[in-house]
Image (tube, rainbow, N blue to C red):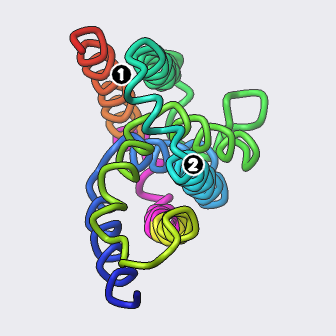
Amino acid sequence: MTASLLGFALFALVVTVVPGPDLLLVLRNCLRGGRRAGAATAIGAALGSLVWAAAAAVGLAAALQRWDAAFTAVRLVGAAYLVFLGVQALRSLRDGAVGGPPPSAGAGRVSVARGLRQGLASCLLNPKVGIFFVAVAPQFLPEGRSVLATTMLFGVIDAVTAAGWLVLVSFGAGGLMTWLRRPRVARGLEGTAGGALIALGVVTAVDAARA
């Protein structure tokens, strides 16, 4: 059992550190709301991963994968959400609300609660997280152990790993806030994050439409 848990933890860590929508969102919210907003976004994404693990444990994710219409619908909604976040970033860039001190609440500042919601929504609207558990967890399941309990344990490991890495990233970025808030640097990061989120959303939508 210990070997299985360590093997899954190592695999989860490798998957987590690969840049994706969650990391882009954490970095963007660090810029828009500081360390706490970035950390809240990270925790929201980790909670979403835990929800998907629970869904996979009871077979929901597997059922969703077999039900093509539902799977495609969830992916399209997720793609639309990524595009929405990207457009928001580019609008902030256009409106000149990037760079300098953190924006006030009325000027688009990302609060802790908002960061938590965005991180949670970003993960929940990504069915690939659920499919990850359906596809990967069986490879690490030890014989004679409860599939439900072990998959949930894997989910906790994955959530803790994701939260730890993304919070570390948010605090690392937080330490660079003075540099990141320089107008030229901030505009570059906001534009890159916005463009990348839109690109990810479009690619996801096209992939879903072709499936």
Residue at x 41% of width, y 34% of height? 190
- Looking at the rendered structure, the secondary structure element under dot 1 is helix
Report the span colored magenta.
Answer: 162-185
Quadrant of the snapshot with the C terminus: top left
Report the residue marked by disc 1.
201
Classed neighbour count for the residue bearing mark 1: other residues with Cα under 10 Å, few (<14), some (14–19), many (≥20): many
Residue 205, placed above or below residue 120: above
Residue 85, placed above or below residue 72: below
Principal secondary structure, stretch drawn in magenta: helix
| Front-lying residue, 94 or 4 | 4
Sequence-wise, which precedes: disc 2 or disc 1?
2
Q: Which amino acid does label 1 sit on?
A: Gly
Q: Residue 88 carries which label?
A: none
Q: In the drawing, does residue 9 fall left or right of residue 117?
A: left
Residue at x 57% of width, y 45% of height? 55
Residue at the limit of the structure toward the front, as seen here: 144
Q: Quadrant of residue 34?
A: bottom right
Q: In the drawing, does residue 78 fall left or right of residue 105?
A: left
| Residues at circles 2 and 1 in contact by the CB criterion of under 8 Å | no
Residue at x 55% of width, y 37% of height? 124
Q: What residue type is labelled 2?
A: Val
Q: Residue 58 carries which label?
A: 2
Q: In the drawing, does residue 185 fall left or right of residue 124?
A: left
Residue 103, placed above or below residue 89: below
Residue 10 rendering spot, x and y as whole percentages: 30, 76
| Front-lying residue, 189 or 73 | 73
Tell me the CA gap for discs 2 and 1. Answer: 28 Å
**Is any part of residue 59 visible from this angle?**
yes
Residue 102 rendering spot, x and y as whole percentages: 63, 45
Residue at x 44% of width, y 34% of height? 127
**Is any part of residue 90 visible from this angle?**
no
- Does 123 lie within the magenta span? no
